[in-house]
Amino acid sequence: MTIVIQCQDRVGLISIISTILRNADCNIVSMRQHVAADAPLFFARIVTDDVEIDALSIKEKLTNALPLGAMITVNPPQKKKIVVLVTKEYHCLGDILLRNNFDNLNAEVVAVVGNYNELSDLTKKFGVPFHYISHENISKDIFEMRLKESIDKYAPDFIVLAKFMRILSPEFVAHFAKKIINIHHSFLPAFIGANPYKRAYERGVKLIGATAHFVTNDLDEGPIITQQVIPVNHTYTAEAMRKAGREIETSTLAEAMQLVFEDRVFVYKNKTVIFK
Amino acid sequence: MTIVIQCQDRVGLISIISTILRNADCNIVSMRQHVAADAPLFFARIVTDDVEIDALSIKEKLTNALPLGAMITVNPPQKKKIVVLVTKEYHCLGDILLRNNFDNLNAEVVAVVGNYNELSDLTKKFGVPFHYISHENISKDIFEMRLKESIDKYAPDFIVLAKFMRILSPEFVAHFAKKIINIHHSFLPAFIGANPYKRAYERGVKLIGATAHFVTNDLDEGPIITQQVIPVNHTYTAEAMRKAGREIETSTLAEAMQLVFEDRVFVYKNKTVIFK
Amino acid sequence: MTIVIQCQDRVGLISIISTILRNADCNIVSMRQHVAADAPLFFARIVTDDVEIDALSIKEKLTNALPLGAMITVNPPQKKKIVVLVTKEYHCLGDILLRNNFDNLNAEVVAVVGNYNELSDLTKKFGVPFHYISHENISKDIFEMRLKESIDKYAPDFIVLAKFMRILSPEFVAHFAKKIINIHHSFLPAFIGANPYKRAYERGVKLIGATAHFVTNDLDEGPIITQQVIPVNHTYTAEAMRKAGREIETSTLAEAMQLVFEDRVFVYKNKTVIFK
Amino acid sequence: MTIVIQCQDRVGLISIISTILRNADCNIVSMRQHVAADAPLFFARIVTDDVEIDALSIKEKLTNALPLGAMITVNPPQKKKIVVLVTKEYHCLGDILLRNNFDNLNAEVVAVVGNYNELSDLTKKFGVPFHYISHENISKDIFEMRLKESIDKYAPDFIVLAKFMRILSPEFVAHFAKKIINIHHSFLPAFIGANPYKRAYERGVKLIGATAHFVTNDLDEGPIITQQVIPVNHTYTAEAMRKAGREIETSTLAEAMQLVFEDRVFVYKNKTVIFK
């Protein structure tokens, strides 16, 4: 069982939590905690090895003992449901579908939605529903309404933007608050916005990066989950950087998804606490 | 205060420990724990933020409550004393003396001992005693006896082999059990023993490495603390690999020292548990 | 056009080669050369930007001017044909099939051969022929004979062992000399042979690696093409290392394939020269 | 001998250059070239193994044969002279002085200039002159005039800003055009300007970086030579990032100096071409 707690900091929290678990005969296999002094908030992730346990009862005891407003989840190991949004590029989606197919994602891809139809064939090869919702010739409002309808019917735990190249409105983001994970093709906060590889090429950088982050209202400004870089040099054109960048876009998003789906990621103040 | 515990694993240890601390009005700033299931052993490192506290009393309470044989240290923040052993190469020693000079080592270099005299000038520049103990024309026993005498009078917490190129006897190692840190110029267990760069060159590897480890009786076989690698290619001769390797020898040893001196490293079964 | 040359070293080779190209009105876009002093051999890779050119005539002129025995290829850009051999693990094959499907491999996967049938469905999803050739209940000779027949009919340029877990005989390797690329799941020469992750776990290493290499007669001893590592720590079981290792097995093999298929890799003396 | 050429691109340049060298009985040990299509410029770095050679004569022949305006240097292996500018932080300067002391810098540190006196002792330990030129209570013009006088008398090949925390005027930079190397404590172009670690902390990045670059008129906007990153996480305060960052500031600057001092770095259009 995985127990995840986020609450106001206070002396004695570890003692309170661990004693509740001990009294319930829960054996703690691993416990990670962090106090963010700039909040101040307490975060903990606890894994126990018991198989038969009364999750509701433990949650109730924790709720009574911890500061008011504590966010507590007591999760039996269970896969998250995700919907993946794409445009035309195959590399992140392909990687996700492969992991999903071989049960190596810690999540279940319940649907893929594309604003182009290019990736329909790939998705269907793996037996996953693909919904083609074009943004062309309609207003952004209507486009997002259709997206929302299409997604909502699956009630996903998370929405993964796997190189989805449309900017989402604050209303859309708010509808799926804290549930949208994006992969941005630069080492944020460098090259926020469009055409990061072209700008990286023009600036003559020697490393290019990728950043996986939660989506908030401000473009490319949400809490960062993971970042990776790879070396480039003067022989790389902007197009060669784009091609090389795909490798780390894929692996950075994969790493972020694994962390999130294993309940290792907490968000506060536009930052993340991650127990790796 | 930093509290470090290693003991047999048992259900409820975190509850026991955290409750003792809570009752002593200690506020836990950070707590890391690990259970090595293959032992099974419990390891914990706890940092508290209290300034005035009865360390002896807390240690006594922990000793009474934890399994028999538990190793418990309750350390006020205090620098370790180290003796550095060298041969002729300057790079690791130079880095250590710089950090020591600017109080950035979390330790105090109380002496340097060399089996050659080459690094005497460098050491003395920084006001650190240098002892030249040649291994030439004497037996290994006598050489090690002189080394021991020279080191023992400083009663160091740790001995750092900063490119010390003599193999130490089991007796010497036993005399300083769990206190000797070595930097080996390869990615162990590849290229154990002499001339790793020459052998790396002949094998045509594409990465070369450095490994910092505790010294035990078997050559290059002690518990690994840190490892780093850097890329090489076909343009590197063995000598060029040696030169490039110095960079990571220096940084790998520096990283290992920092971890050890901050009480972050535990040893069991020829392995380490490290709370970074 | 890509011109690749390997020959005995001699003064003036660059002048000879570049003057032949200049006289043929070839514009050199990039030229890389290396002299391996321990051979001594000269290696060059030249890319020209001409579209209409008499490749045969240039090859003849180079052959006449360069030292006897020079290996010279003058390749119009053309995809290599490859056969992929697999056992049960999907990750490398899945990555290869995705790249192949989206024309991002610089090669064409003409067939997949498995000694188990597990990956048949995945392969067929992508419209690639899958041949199931079991090694069970038959001699190694017969198994390899069937493999050979199955591969030979495709006349591939390269054979990629994408986690193919059978050891191949010297006869088999000789039949496809210099054409077989393997991914080994360790940082060679550490952990040659079976169960590298289990041994890495027992040794307590802090980095695990993957090595792509050409296959020669000695197990895991062929010329290394690429190597990658990722950090691990005390929380990793052998199984967790295996899972983490898959990520770099996939990316290391992908990197090696790209280098080989773009005619960037030369072999001599159990080493490689690679013009990245 | 190292020959370095930068000129307008034209068909046949390699043939022209290599034939001149061949006719002078120069044996090319290594040759690297690059055509920057966006200029278009041709860059080459050639190392020959001859000991006795008429450098002037070769330079004359190259000048006559290459496009007008070609920049050509024919360097016997010779150390660069450098002046290092510092403020208060020791880590980059200490590393430079160590390498200089043990003849491992490919340059000679002829003087250190500080706008504070903090690093005077360290510098003098190594027998290098230290000039203390305060910026306090004087105008920027006068401060820079004194800096210039102090530097000019050494006629250095390069000026290294080793954590020199004053912004230099366009006039000062122009006076030492293409000769000033800076280490910036962020992964440019992220966090240009002041307090990058504080801003990195607030943004919650998962990697921090360092960038070595030539200085031009615009702050932190000059051509990038090298960049490195290291991972950080939620346990890092801004101060901890600053401390961790020092490690890569030191190594990034060291790498950049080595490349520049070995005549491997070319500048055009605010970018660099680097033959590693």
Image: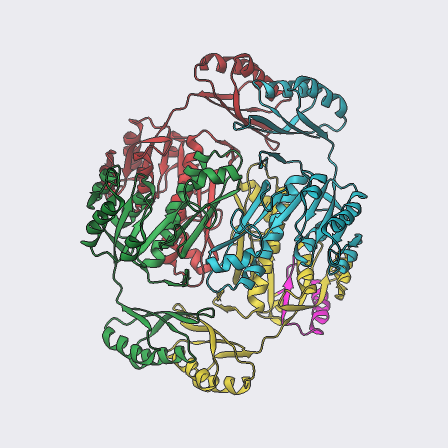
Chain colours: A yellow, B green, C cyan, D red
Viewer-side residue, A132 vs A48: A48
Where on the picture, by quarter, is residue A19?
Answer: bottom left
Q: Nearer the viewer, residue D196 or C197?
A: C197
Quadrant position of residue C271 = top right
x and y, in percent, of residue C37 in the image:
52, 27
* Residue D140 falls in image quadrant: top left
> In which quadrant is the N terminus of chain D drawn?
top left
Residue D218 vertical position relative to residue C37 in the rendered view, above or below: below
Q: Which residues are magenta?
A: A140-169
Is residue D28 visible from the viewing direction of this image?
A: yes
Residue A96 magenta = no
Quick one: A113 or A100, which is closer to the camera?
A100
Taking D273 as reference, is B50 left or right? left
Residue extending farthest front:
C139
Image coordinates of residue B23 in percent, x first then y, are 31, 82
Q: Is residue D132 visible?
A: no
Q: Is residue A85 above or below residue D158?
A: below
Percent across and percent down for residue C99 are 70, 50
Tell me which residue sits at (53%, 38%) in the image: B233
Residue B205 screen position, x and y as percent? 53, 41
Residue at left offset 42%, top offset 78%: B10
Tell which of D82 and B104 is nearer to you: B104
Q: Residue at x 20, y 54 (%)?
A: B152
